[in-house]
């Protein structure tokens, strides 16, 4: 009869379980992400560097942004910043895995948004509604892909959320 085997096996299984749990916690935090070289934007998903690039919002979940409304962003090393319609904003992000990211907080001004006219007697644009929708949607972003002169953000479920057009010059 072998004595102590069940106890030794139980200890081994417990140790293995603890080891796996701690490695999963580490992986969930870092997702195996290696440090990036200086000057490379962690927002990238393997494409050209987005660092310093500027973009104008085209649509939110397929709804086109009115031409009269200026919502934009500039990509920094660990934050996106720009105008959300009537307020300036900054949202920080951190890299998750090799191709993803997670927004970690947003700061924006507290100016009251105005209503913009389109054409005389025509519909108006509630800038506050657009600003709120944009900020909420951007905070749920988890990946991005550049396609030519457009930048497509996807929410954490992989659905397309916001689309931007590249800004050139002072436009």
Image (spheres, grey):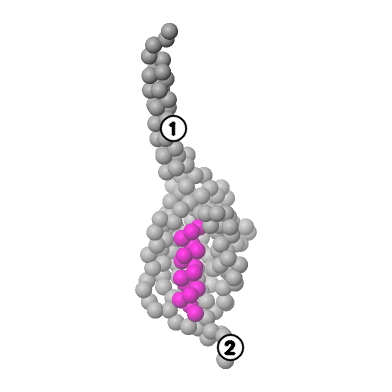
Q: Disc 2 on helix, strand or loop?
A: loop
At a point 58% along the width and 68% down the height, the residue shown is 59
- Name the image quarter holding residue 82: bottom left
Label 1 – label 2 distance at C-alpha: 62 Å
Which mark is first along the chain, 2 or 1?
1
Outermost residue toward the right in this view: 148
Q: Which residue is mark 1?
A: 20
Mark 1 and 2 residues: CB-CB less than 8 Å, in contact? no
Q: How many marks?
A: 2
Residue 56 point in image, percent of width and height: 54, 68
- Image coordinates of residue 32 in percent, x first then y, are 47, 39
Q: Which residue occupies 40% across, 35% down?
A: 22
Mark number, residue 35: none
- As rendered, which of 24 and 142 lies closer to the eye? 24
Observer able to see residue 164: no
User: Dot 1: within a 10 Å radius of its alpha carbon, few (fewer than 14), some, or many (20 or more) residues?
Assistant: few
- Viewer-nearest residue: 19 or 147: 19
Which of the two marks, 1 or 2, is nearer to us in this view? 1
Can the viewer see residue 149? yes
Main SS, magenta region, reads: helix
The magenta span reads 126-141
Q: Is residue 136 magenta?
A: yes
What residue lies at 50% left-to-right and 83% top-to-bottom? 116
Judging by the rendered image, the residue that carries numbered circle 2 is 122
Q: Is residue 69 above or below residue 119?
A: above
The residue carrying pointer 2 sits among few (fewer than 14), some (14 to 19) or many (20 or more) residues within 10 Å by Cα, namely: few
Quarter of the image that includes the N terminus:
top left
Whether residue 65 is situated above or below residue 123 in the rendered picture: above
Residue in view at x 46 percent, y 49 percent: 95
Whether the magenta-drawn stretch holds residue 110 is answered as no
- Secondary structure at badge 1 equals helix
Q: Position of residue 155 (x, y in %)?
A: 53, 57
């Amino acid at each position: 009869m072998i004595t102590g085997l069940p106890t030794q096996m139980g200890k081994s299984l417990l140790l293995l379980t603890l080891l796996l749990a701690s490695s999963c916690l580490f992986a969930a935090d870092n997702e195996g992400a290696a440090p990036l070289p200086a000057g490379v934007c962690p927002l990238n998903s393997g494409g050209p560097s987005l660092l310093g690039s500027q973009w104008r919002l085209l649509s939110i979940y397929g709804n086109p942004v009115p031409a009269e409304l200026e919502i934009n962003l500039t990509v920094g090393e660990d934050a996106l910043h720009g105008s959300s319609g009537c307020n300036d904003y900054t949202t920080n992000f951190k890299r998750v895995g090799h191709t993803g990211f997670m927004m970690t907080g947003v700061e924006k001004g507290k100016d009251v948004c105005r209503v913009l006219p389109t054409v005389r007697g025509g519909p108006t644009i509630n800038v506050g509604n657009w600003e709120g929708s944009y900020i909420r949607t951007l905070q749920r972003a988890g990946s991005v892909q550049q396609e030519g002169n457009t930048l497509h953000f996807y929410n954490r479920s992989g659905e397309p959320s916001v689309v931007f057009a590249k800004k050139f010059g002072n436009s």
